[in-house]
Amino acid sequence: MKKRVLITGGAGFIGSHLSDLFLSKGYQVIVMDNLLTGKMKNIAHNLKNKDFKFIKHNVTEYIDLKGDLFAILHFASPASPADYLKYPIPTLKVGALGTHNALGLALAKRCKFLLASTSEVYGDPLVNPQPEKYWGNVNPIGPRGVYDEAKRFAEAITMAYNRYHSVDTKIVRIFNTYGPRMRGNDGRAIPNFLSQALKDRPITMYGSGKQTRSFCYASDLIAGIYKLLLSKEHEPVNIGNPNEMSLLKLAKLIIRLTGSESKIVYEVLPVDDPKVRCPDIGKAKRLLKWHPKVQIEEGLENTIPSFK
């Protein structure tokens, strides 16, 4: 019997790449998604695979699934600022009710559970780079609070199920990730800049552009998540690329790689937008023997064709 995994939010950018990984390793994959922000085109290439199944379902409602499971990977949630500002209440509900339902299923199936958390739990950090022991600087009532606090609650209930019910839980704190299958209107820096550059439109820079991010290519992230799932670690682990760069430098790199004639225009910085974002990946290196391999220029060259 092949091991089965359930991926909630599996029609999204990262979830669809996870499906590919598990299928390549001989697992059966069930994807559950309500398609609020996920897209069927991300998983269309797997629909005829006998080891793949898609279920349209909102995980904030009770999850009923027959048969054994090896693991549940809970990735259901709007994940970009454009999405969670548009869907604030569904974002809070999937972080709370959806995580509760997915954990309840993990308890019933006695299977592994991996929560997709985020670097956003650190808020606008006062420490750089951010280690897992840092508790963050989050505005709970700001516009970004719906996502930040949903994920912080999701981490808390995940740890509660581990401590009280002995569920084998994992928490991955995902830093900025990019690659094929990102939506052009995603609202994050790389898809925004690529979409604008490829159309020779002005590239929108919020603030001065001096704020920093670090960008992890999708294949590196997925490899780290898989290693974490099979590990014995229960507390959060950062997975991301620690090579920090300013958004202005990123925009100029994208203009060069696309051969674009775009000019950079400056807009007001959104409320609570972080000034820095960079993972301390010492824990992932030590426990998982993981580190990112794809550098930003190579990753962008792999991503640009899908945006074209």
Image: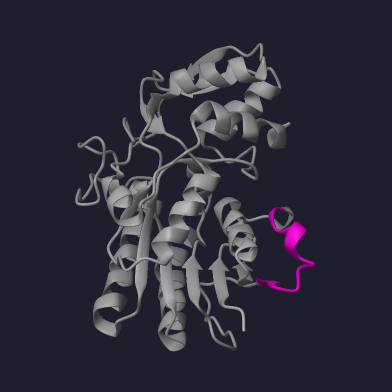
Above or below: residue 162 compared with residue 186: below
Q: Residue at point 56% right, 62% down?
A: 9
| Coordinates of residue 31 in the picture (x, y in percent) | 62, 68
Locate the N terminus by quadrant: bottom right
Q: Residue at point 32% right, 55% down?
A: 237
Quadrant in the picture for residue 123? top left
Above or below: residue 56 compared with residue 203: below
> Is residue 21 or residue 198 the one in the foreground?
21
In the image, which residues are magenta?
Answer: 42-55
Q: Is residue 124 left or right of residue 244?
A: left
| Coordinates of residue 219 in the picture (x, y in percent) | 54, 47
| Coordinates of residue 137 in the picture (x, y in percent) | 23, 44
- Residue lying farthest front? 289
- Colour scheme of the picture: one colour
Residue 51 lies in the magenta-colored region = yes
Locate the C terminus by quadrant: top right
Q: Is residue 120 left or right of residue 263?
A: left
Q: Residue at point 63% right, 14% down?
A: 262
- Can the viewer see residue 141? no
> Is residue 308 or residue 79 the one in the foreground?
308
Residue 180 lies in the magenta-colored region = no
| Coordinates of residue 199 in the picture (x, y in percent) | 71, 22
